[in-house]
Image (cartoon, grey):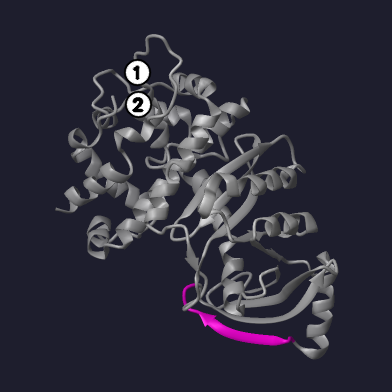
Amino acid sequence: MRSARIARLARESFLEEPLMEGFTDIRKKPVIALRTILMSLYLMPFFSMTSLLSNDRMARTKRYRRLFSCRRKMVASDSTFARVLGWLKYQEVQRFLLRFLKMFEQRDMLRKRLCEGGRLRRLGVLDGSYMGGHWQVTLCLPGKIAYPVMLRGYRKRGKELEAARELMRDAPGVLGKARPELWLLDALYFNTATIEIAREQQAHVLFKFKKTDLRTVTKDAQNLFEHYGGDEEQSGFDTERLCRWWVRKTEEKFHSEYPVQVVELVERYVKRKQNRNTRCWIVSTDLELSLEEIREAAHQRWQVENNVFKRISHLSGTKRFYFRDPKRFFTLLHILYAGMAMLDYIMALLKDHPLVFAALRGGIKPTWRNVCSQIQEVLYGLSAALVRVT
């Protein structure tokens, strides 16, 4: 019963044949179906394949070939993967990554309640990273899952802000009603141009950073707090992160034009041996955010770093293996992001069924690789009924 339910979940949400429709095959007499090649790339995060070569090795195993109902000696080679990535249309892989947006929206996976009793909000996190020898900026929609929905490459260090602004401007047209209502950004984006882009979209921004002297509004707020205290103060204990926190705020005007909340956040982690005390500053144009919501929103800014960049590097090795051709790399990254987002979605669905999830884990810690290894065993056992992609 457990295996049947997990197999049905994987088939309906992760391994459906229509998933790979919409790609143009330029080959005249293909030996391997394009959907088979793309599905193998899509499964790289699921099987922790950290390079095209590791995919090649996995593709030669009997169990993996049986998963694809493949009678050849291998599903596809690393050279085949690289060649296909070179001629795939970039617009098609962008549409592929966006294909999951409707499904996640229907399941209400892309909204977040920042505090108990607060309203559901659509958040957007922008950040840049260096992967595979290339610079890129990613837009993540954090909710019940972390969905890296759009990305943009840029040529060299120092061009992140320009690429991020283009991505911000494009987001409403691409995402529609799923566009962010509150942008969560770091110190690099703290300027009037970013605020103006958000205002044009009827959205707000929240900036989180450490250095008080970054802007005049934070230096003035620090002076106020040291001598008079905050206009509003609050403290509490975070049972999830095991830390005691204190916040105090005031209201200022940024560039004498934009009213903002300026908040100082101090946290003390009770179980840490190092960096037990942390302090940061938060500035937001949304004056309706409560202090609890501001604090949680600041933590949500780490979603793109912890649950996208570090996770895709851990599962697919994007930080370690080098791609000379940026087009090949960004084409692959779209497919890997899609696979990782679907994995996150499956994990969220499994957690909604605690008995099935507990039976699946069998007592092991619920890390991604542990849970994936258990699901793989179920899929291998039912492979003939699962995948019809060759």
Q: Are the residues flagged by discs 1 and 2 in contact, CB closer than 8 Å?
A: yes
74 is higher (above) or lower (below) than 226: above
Q: Provide the secondary structure element on which disc 1 rests.
A: loop
Identify the residue at horizontal 75%, vertical 42% (top origin): 159
Identify the residue at horizontal 41%, vertical 52% (top origin): 104
Which mark, by number, is residue 32?
A: 1
Between residue 108 and residue 308, name the one nearer to us.
108
The chief SS type of the magenta part is strand
- In the picture, the quarter occupied by the C terminus is top left
* Residue 219 image offset from top left, x and y in percent: 84, 73
Identify the residue at horizontal 40%, vertical 26% (top origin): 56
The crowding category of the residue bearing disc 2, from other C-alpha atoms within 10 Å (few below 14, some 14 to 19, many at least 20), is some
Identify the residue at horizontal 62%, vertical 77% (top origin): 267
245 is higher (above) or lower (below) than 150: below
Report the magenta residues as a range.
Answer: 230-240
254 is higher (above) or lower (below) than 90: below
Between residue 189 and residue 173, name the one nearer to us.
173
The crowding category of the residue bearing disc 1, from other C-alpha atoms within 10 Å (few below 14, some 14 to 19, many at least 20), is some
